[in-house]
Image (tube, coloured by chain):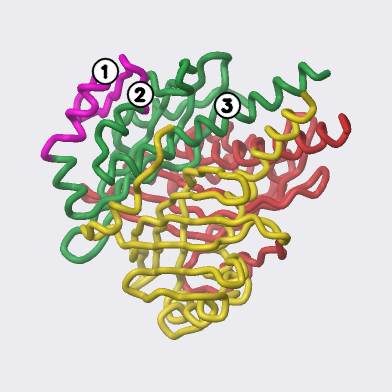
Chain colours: A yellow, B green, C red
Amino acid sequence: MADSISRRIAALEDREAIRDLISRYGPLADRGDCVGAAALWTENGIYDVGGYGVHHGRASIQALLEGEAHQGLIAGGAAHVLTMPVIELDGEEATAWTYSCVFRHIQGRFEPYRVAANRWRLARTRAGWRVAERVHRMLDGDQAARLLLALPDT
Amino acid sequence: MADSISRRIAALEDREAIRDLISRYGPLADRGDCVGAAALWTENGIYDVGGYGVHHGRASIQALLEGEAHQGLIAGGAAHVLTMPVIELDGEEATAWTYSCVFRHIQGRFEPYRVAANRWRLARTRAGWRVAERVHRMLDGDQAARLLLALPDT
Amino acid sequence: MADSISRRIAALEDREAIRDLISRYGPLADRGDCVGAAALWTENGIYDVGGYGVHHGRASIQALLEGEAHQGLIAGGAAHVLTMPVIELDGEEATAWTYSCVFRHIQGRFEPYRVAANRWRLARTRAGWRVAERVHRMLDGDQAARLLLALPDT
């Protein structure tokens, strides 16, 4: 009984930790904390951004965020919003699905600049949950984005 | 004590399950898994979409999603985003309130196509929490949407 | 053991309560329940809205929402969407970070009217968690918004 109680609490804590991890990406990216944002991934984690390339490892993800495109975007004003995830726990691993919506400020107003499907592979590390792989596909009619949204049955 | 502990955990699990249920709608709808999306409802569940009709039962909800309007929308690229819900548990039933925002890709850019208030009546079934009734009202100045947002006191 | 179990559950409950508190702002504000929205704050709570002034205490926050600007906005149709927060618990206090996005209906369509960074200081009161301070800064290129997004290390 105590064992089962502990397991149920641990599952709830895992879900909280994964939600927290995903929620941190936006503020870190928009503040320009490129080291902090890259540290959400495992050391060899992958960020597959679709048209923006496949980035292997923290250094590559950090470089992406330090690049002109991202820095220009956040200097003008941007919000990298991630939505409430669907989370599937599987022991030391987990998968989550969210949308991402980047709003940017341009010519005195805001616009939804990028809207994408995201599938996250997560891994429990000694430092807590980290992103092993994030795949991001723009929802612009590309079939790849729709394929990414395949959920397991409840 | 063990009893009260178990009840507290069960309430947390209920909230997680309801969040998960609501979060699944978007990916299922945008992928075009119309059977899967309809299966979030109870067998006789209701989806009252305002201007888009009142749909009774899974078959009717599935037909709505299989219709031309929804299929055209997702073929062009769309994200049915649901926001973090306010949840009120009441034993075998629950109520939740969210916003929904449908972004669509059109003429090379994204736009917030529909923004609405949603009230969800949820029911615990043998298969887990399901939607008994979802009422959706566009936030276009219509009083009906504002009435839907009535929350109980904390 | 029972003690540690109880503490772990309490932390999960605190996170749920804070998420619930923040999620309530939108529906209360958009419905026009100005008393209810102001009651999310502590009696002397602060709402620092950036260009819209610093409001001290519930009466001042209520007056802000009863004012012409907010009332005109919600009469036309608006959604005050708050995103999934990063939450840091610290005993009787907590801090949370979210984005806020106000969509408005104008000239027959929706637009993201205001997109902002928000830092919430929360306090546990006898009536439950309440907002001690909410600081809101538009993400329009202003450095103040980016500074607000400083997260503690995980």
Q: Residues within 10 Å of mark 2 (few under 14, many from 20)?
A: many
Specify the amino acid type for callout 2.
Trp
Q: Residues within 10 Å of mark 3 (few under 14, many from 20)?
A: many
Q: CA distance from mark 3 to mark 2?
A: 16 Å
Left or right position of B136 against A35? left
Seen in the picture, residue C119 relative to C76 is either above or below; the reply is below
Residue that badge 1 annotates: B57
Q: CA distance from mark 1 to mark 3?
A: 23 Å
Is A80 one of the magenta-colored residues? no
Residue C31 visible from this viewpoint: no
Image coordinates of residue B65 in percent, x first then y, are: 21, 34
Specify the amino acid type for callout 3.
Asp
> At x 30% / y 19%, what residue is drawn?
B46
Residue that badge 3 annotates: B14
Magenta residues span B40-68
Specify the amino acid type for callout 1.
Gly
The answer to whether tags 1 and 2 share a subunit is: yes
Which chain contains the residue that carries disc 1? B
Image coordinates of residue A111 in percent, x first then y, are: 33, 63
Left or right position of B74 against A11? left
The answer to whether tags 3 and 2 share a subunit is: yes
What label sits on residue B41 in the rendered view? 2
